Amino acid sequence: DGGITQSPKYLFRKEGQNVTLSCEQNLNHDAMYWYRQDPGQGLRLIYYSQIVNDFQKGDIAEGYSVSREKKESFPLTVTSAQKNPTAFYLCASSILPGTGASGANVLTFGAGSRLTVL
Amino acid sequence: EDKVVQSPLSLVVHEGDTVTLNCSYEVTNFRSLLWYKQEKKAPTFLFMLTSSGIEKKSGRLSSILDKKELFSILNITATQTGDSAVYLCAVDNYGQNFVFGPGTRLSVLP
């Protein structure tokens, strides 16, 4: 079945450590995204990528880094510079914006990774 | 700044009740509005709305968009405990991503 796989589901980190969250998709989607979700808030975009070896910052990119070496994979590193990293992280993918029927496209999400900093 | 607002933020009902969830938006450009249901993990897609006045329906769920008044509603009739979830509204603003609202947390009691 096609979908998005995120790992790990739960992760604990000590302050000062970097941690990398994995996101793999087999939907043949060009675009991939990382969102952060905090209680009572909407999803906020961290980074997105529309093509291999290229990515753009979203609204809250500070303290995060990404890479896109393969179309299927878009890992997110939460660095020690991120001041408040405890959150639920969602990876998503889609066809390229504007290329769907009537130009509209739909995000497909992974199951999420919950990061807790101790 | 583009913005999506949802109301209420949380709602508690009993099985069999009908609920209406609201989503209003202010965006520079509008391409589509999407509704997602999020239980404990991945949001799952419910509806995509692009045209005003055309109701989308799936079982007990339905949704409609008003592009003049800049809002959408999601209706759930004869609610069941399995409808308990956070319902997310998002707008595609012709940007490179979507603008999400804070979500409405619906709890359906038996």
Image (tube, coloured by chain):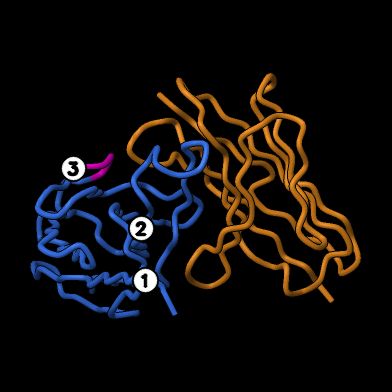
Chain colours: A blue, B orange
Chain letter belonging to callout 2: A
Residue positioned 68% across, 19% down in the render: B68
Compared across the picture, whether A44 is left or right of B36 comes to left
Residue B54, label in figure:
none
Q: What residue is pinned by disc 1?
A: A4
- Magenta-colored span: A56-60
N-terminal label among 3 and 2: 3
Q: Quadrant of residue B11?
A: bottom right
Q: In the rendered structure, which amino acid carries the disc numbered 2?
A: Ser
> SS of the residue at dot 1?
strand
* Majority secondary structure of magenta residues: loop
Q: Does the CB distance between marks 1 and 2 fall below 8 Å?
A: yes
Q: What residue is pinned by disc 3?
A: A56
Residue A93, label in figure:
2
Residue positioned 82% across, 52% down in the render: B19
N-terminal label among 1 and 2: 1
Residue positioned 79% across, 47% down in the render: B20
Give the spatial CA distance, label 3 vs label 2: 14 Å
Q: Quadrant of residue A35?
A: bottom left
> SS of the residue at dot 2?
strand
Q: Is residue B5 magenta?
A: no
Q: In the rendered structure, which amino acid carries the disc numbered 1?
A: Ile
